Image: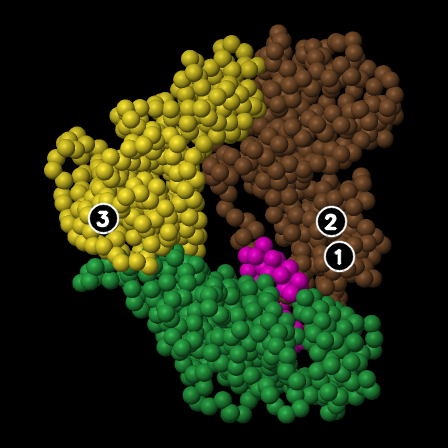
Chain colours: A green, B yellow, C brown
Amino acid sequence: MTLPERLVPPRAKGSSVARVSKAWYIACSSGELGKKPLEREILGLPIVLFRGHGGEPGALLDRCPHRNVPLSLGRVTQGNLECVYHGWQFDRAGECKKVPALCKGSSGGGAATAFGCVERDGYVWVWPDAEREPVGEPFHFPLVGAPGYTTVHQHVAADASLHATAENALDVPHTAFLHAGLFRSDDRERNPVDVVVRRWPERVEAEYIGEPRPEGVVGRLLSPRGGVVQHWDRFHLPSIVQVEYKLDAAHILVTAALTPESDYRTHLYAVISFKLPVPGWPLVPVLKPIALMIFNQDARLLRRQTEAIRRFGGEHYVSTELDVLGPHILRLLRSAEKGAPEKAEKNGTTSAPKEKRFRMEV
Amino acid sequence: MTLPERLVPPRAKGSSVARVSKAWYIACSSGELGKKPLEREILGLPIVLFRGHGGEPGALLDRCPHRNVPLSLGRVTQGNLECVYHGWQFDRAGECKKVPALCKGSSGGGAATAFGCVERDGYVWVWPDAEREPVGEPFHFPLVGAPGYTTVHQHVAADASLHATAENALDVPHTAFLHAGLFRSDDRERNPVDVVVRRWPERVEAEYIGEPRPEGVVGRLLSPRGGVVQHWDRFHLPSIVQVEYKLDAAHILVTAALTPESDYRTHLYAVISFKLPVPGWPLVPVLKPIALMIFNQDARLLRRQTEAIRRFGGEHYVSTELDVLGPHILRLLRSAEKGAPEKAEKNGTTSAPKEKRFRMEV
Amino acid sequence: MTLPERLVPPRAKGSSVARVSKAWYIACSSGELGKKPLEREILGLPIVLFRGHGGEPGALLDRCPHRNVPLSLGRVTQGNLECVYHGWQFDRAGECKKVPALCKGSSGGGAATAFGCVERDGYVWVWPDAEREPVGEPFHFPLVGAPGYTTVHQHVAADASLHATAENALDVPHTAFLHAGLFRSDDRERNPVDVVVRRWPERVEAEYIGEPRPEGVVGRLLSPRGGVVQHWDRFHLPSIVQVEYKLDAAHILVTAALTPESDYRTHLYAVISFKLPVPGWPLVPVLKPIALMIFNQDARLLRRQTEAIRRFGGEHYVSTELDVLGPHILRLLRSAEKGAPEKAEKNGTTSAPKEKRFRMEV
């Protein structure tokens, strides 16, 4: 299959948009995919999901090869997806299994474009490159079901590029302004902390050492007595962002798999696991609205950022050393676009990272 | 006149869009064009219609040559169309008859672009090629006013190319799916019928031989006792689609003249004439809503097809022999774009057609 | 700074759009700019206005150099504009004065793009070319505060190019059609008047000699007894339009500074000064709604003209000698785009004008 050029428009100069198609992305949660076909978009590709024989999920390009009507308008019958227009039927591999009214011996219908599709950890994952066999397994979320841990799932979406969304999720300095009062704030004595950045071929990590417990609502909830926080931010190719906090007996790990719907629309499937000195589940109804409030502040900001980028025809960024992970994430995404990280993985990712250290006033 | 490039954008690769400008198209019914100018669009050209001296209809490009304001905002005065901005007046030929405030002897205003325009059979027809004199007469609808026949007129529009609209109107296999229950259905024994396709230089016809009366609502209404249907589907350049049924003493002829408003918006002006063993007119109030229901199912489907085509940047069709007329219609439209069918007509269209025969399970 | 190409798209062929960036334009009235930053657009450039130290107005490109978020979302703190995302602060010159969390000795943030900005006559004026130092002073409105004169300010906007807006404002023949009854009308004996056009390198003037007082509402209000009007229409680079009437002891001067928000959106900041035989202020509540009615008729017409221009991909005008000032205005704007009028000004603008004379039936 050669995709129409429209689906792969040239990237604006200076853009932070990356299009990593050789990767597993979450298309939906397992619960969202029932008896009806489901319409999704990944990297600008219209995709239809359905459950074939035995309930196994399948993913096809959402366009009937016959007359180009979306297959998602059809229905599932005996494990095949049937087009609403002329009733052509396709299986999970895209093969055309039936063309109604055709006499035996006549040459049959064409195949639909199929994508790799698996179900893991309660999510349906798609490999949006139809020309290549999927390599490896989807990312596995750690700490889910671990003793003493409570896990919460959350799906949100932002009108921003995958890079801008990931950078925002792992950015510390903006929390004192955009989320003033909730996390950190600006009207106070600042504390110098050490920042250590460690780089591997397919991931990057920032460790913040010596930060007193933040003064905001979130910090007070988690540790009323104060203390010093251990804090890591991580990005893992192709699209995993992770924030980890430790404070005395409290441990919080937020892992989100990002899915690029299109150049400037990104989904976050977040899995939040935490262990607290007190039982965790009573905190869920309190923390969830706060987390959503923080996310909505970010989503509004990211949308305005995207509008500005569109208006000016591209990004034009100036960074300081406080932009700790953003430039590294872009470099990783660019190398993944070229296929480089695959090679790197073969060489093993446990090799010693490159390290850099500096100070920040948090 | 050289049209701005904007009006003739390049056609997407693999597109089924055809732009046959040397042809008569219906712009409106006679009743729609009264004392006020009327705004229409044919092949992407904004056109203003008005009644000049003696009520004769005229068609001009909907743009005053002076300051480019739409002439359709103006009024008709003494058989001329007057621009709302400075009062310039134009006749049916586009000639500028008056520039108010201009002293005698000063050089006058420019002409408006005029199109061929005639009134026939209750419709106003326009020839949307301003650079060529119209050739021949508009298509004449048969059986209107014939003894024993009832005639109904219907105007609908679809968000689809002229080709997709014509193919859909003349397509048999989709009726068992998109219109399940109304016409034919899929959950039944199918019957093999013979299909004969006949091609002439400017038209194509498919004859279906041996089909038992369809089981759906429409078939039962027309012939409660059953029987064997005689059935022809026809396409005639530039844009005439025709469906004919005979069943015992019943005879139905649906003829529709299609008008391409733009690449993906097509009007159907349908003239339905029928003769039944019982008087025809009491059936009109019953058949009209059913016909509209069928058309609305097609219109919804065609709009989704067009959306998919736009999303993917063009059509990418795979056909089987069940796509009886669609590929032939496209070939005819392509030859008409190049002007070939005109030549063919000179050689006479009564020459023997090319014939092809195969079987279909209807 | 090199502007993204998106901001300077190529001009359509035959377009009347002119982009004179080396000029002072009104961005807002003094009263509109308070403690909060204000978002504006000039020549397609997103601009943020704010009051710096001492209340002096500043104008920056509305894009934080750091992560491209609109600066207009931020706030003013101690005379600097603070970005909402990470709290970077900029002064009136665009210099980055603070990057929160950055330790001393680290290299700081980038500068914002700054534009020339001054406050004169109750308006904030911006010079929308960041690459050049402003030359000269903004246009000064005459007769404001002169003895015996009443002055009214009015701000309106039209969806049309600066050229189309200026031509419309100074066009006489359309008043009998678009504003029939209010000003002049078409159903009457017309009077021949002499028109004298005088051209200087940076301005053009038309004088109408011998016109009887117009019959419409406006004329009757200003001079119940009739008489002969003295009337001048003027255009002054870069964007000043002026209409002057004298009739016995009555004197009306309408001066409007036009601001091109974008290619097809233009603001008019009008200053109307008049002296009448009777006190002027009681007339204000009567004349203002009439003036707005006239302007709204023009604005609707101009929007339809712009829609037609967009639809056809550009202007395609045919003129007669009745288009007295429009073609001259376009020539002036084109020369200003190339920077020519600056030179002309050095040679002095008091040199004798080129004169042309003809007759018009008003």
Question: On the image, which quarter does residue C151 sit in?
Answer: top right
Residue marked by disc 1 = C92
Residue B166 in sight: no
Q: Quadrant of residue C220?
A: top right
Residue under the image location 80 percent in, 24 percent down: C286
Secondary element at tag 2 = strand
- Within the magenta stretch, is there residue A302? yes
Q: Amino acid at mark 2?
A: Cys
| Residue B192 against residue C334 in the figure, above or below | below
Viewer-side residue, A216 vs C78: A216
Subunit of label 2: C
Residue C3 placed where, x, y %? 58, 55
Q: Which residue is mark 2?
A: C117
Q: On the rendered image, what quadrant is the C terminus of chain C found in? A: top right
Q: Is residue C286 above or below residue B237?
A: above
Tell me residue C132's x, y (percent).
64, 50
Secondary element under disc 3, as helix, strand or loop, is: strand
The quadrant where residue B169 appears: top left
Residue interval drawn in magenta:
A299-322
At 66% from the left and 42% from the top, the residue drawn is C23
| Amino acid type assigned to the residue bearing label 1 in the image | Arg
Nearer the observer: mark 2 or 3; the answer is 3
Residue B211 circle label: 3
Front tag of 1 and 3 = 3
**Tag 2 and tag 1, C-beta contact below 8 Å:** yes
**Callout 1: SS:** loop
The residue nearer to you, when weighing B205 against A294, is B205
Please indicate, yes or no, whether residue C62 appears anywhere in the rendered image: yes
Side of C123 where C296 appears, left or right: left
Given the image, what chain letter belongs to the residue carrying mark 3?
B
